[in-house]
């Protein structure tokens, strides 16, 4: 990526050091990673075990087996039912802090990177978790020839495009910097549209009276994405 950036801007290591370019590329990587909370390539599934009479579990505990840890939780379930998410205010009303209730958890709330189960588990239960893992650090400190972790191949050139824009900016060429920033944003928007599309596993019925997806099948409410 450093070689690509330098070839486009027509500079060498005496103009911008490897460390500075690494930081530019790391910035681009972070812009991509944190521009969307629910990139599908960060989806993970894991489990954690409850502790009797313990209702609060930190995000680090819930995602203890996930590389880079959990960034966000999408759903929780036990072996026989899905836990319903409720707001912390509702949970405080239904399960006051001065009232001790225990049993198999049926609800969960979330606040300050902590999951609270309702009622508090009365035994050890295995809770299945679906969520989104944290990204691997990339940029300053990365070795040569190391590709951006987690990002599919189409994103690699977008990271490099951001590096080109920052390099032009550092070389005091604001016009070219603005042009490549525009290219970066356009390419990122295109990739978002491609990767954030809602999944459609149900078949399309052709040559029938009903041509839409799913026909008369009643589907459960799907997860809503952040832009909806």
Image: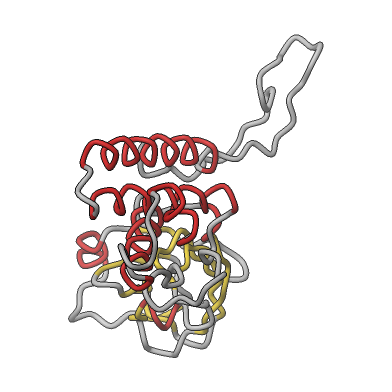
Quadrant housing residue 11 = bottom left
Question: Where is 158 relative to 110, above or below?
Answer: above
Residue lying at 20% horizontally and 61% vertically, measured from the top left: 89
Question: Where is 138 relative to 75, above or below?
Answer: below
- Count of numbered circles on the image: 0
Residue lying at 43% horizontally and 54% vertically, measured from the top left: 5
Residue lying at 31% horizontally and 64% vertically, measured from the top left: 16
| Color style of the picture | secondary structure
Q: Is residue 99 left or right of residue 127?
A: left
Residue lying at 42% horizontally and 56% vertically, measured from the top left: 6
Quadrant containing the C terminus in the rendered view: top left
Where in the figure is residue 59, as x and y percent of width and height?
37, 76
Question: Is 133 in front, or is 218?
Answer: 133
Where in the figure is residue 226, as x and y percent of width and height?
36, 44
Question: Where is 216 relative to 161, above or below?
Answer: above
Where in the figure is residue 48, as x and y percent of width and height?
52, 81
Question: Is 220 in front, or is 22?
Answer: 22
Question: Where is 7 relative to 146, above or below?
Answer: above
Where in the figure is residue 150, as x and y percent of width and height?
54, 63
Q: Is residue 50 left or right of residue 55?
A: right
In this view, the residue farthest toward the right is: 207
Quadrant housing residue 183 = top left
Q: Is residue 151 left or right of residue 113?
A: right
């Amino acid at each position: 990526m450093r070689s690509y950036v330098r070839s486009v801007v027509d500079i060498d290591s005496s103009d911008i050091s490897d460390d500075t370019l690494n930081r530019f590329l790391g910035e681009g990587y972070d812009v991509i990673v944190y521009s969307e909370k629910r990139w599908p390539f960060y989806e993970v599934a894991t489990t954690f075990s409850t502790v009797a009479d313990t209702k609060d579990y930190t995000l680090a505990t819930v995602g203890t087996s996930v590389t880079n840890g959990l960034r966000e939780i999408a759903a929780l379930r036990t072996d026989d039912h899905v836990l319903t998410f409720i707001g912390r205010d509702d949970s405080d009303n239904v399960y006051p802090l001065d009232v001790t209730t225990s049993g198999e958890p049926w609800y969960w709330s979330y606040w300050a990177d902590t999951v609270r189960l309702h009622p508090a588990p009365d035994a050890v239960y295995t809770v299945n978790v679906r969520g989104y893992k944290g990204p691997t650090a990339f940029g300053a400190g990365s070795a040569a020839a190391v590709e951006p972790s987690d990002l599919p191949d189409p994103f690699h050139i977008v990271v490099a495009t951001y590096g080109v824009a920052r390099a032009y900016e550092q070389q005091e060429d604001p016009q070219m910097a603005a042009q490549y920033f525009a290219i970066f944003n356009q390419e990122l928007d295109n990739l978002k549209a491609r990767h954030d599309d809602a999944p459609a596993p149900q078949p399309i019925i052709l040559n029938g009276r009903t041509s839409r997806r799913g026909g008369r099948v009643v589907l459960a409410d799907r997860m809503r994405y952040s832009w909806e």
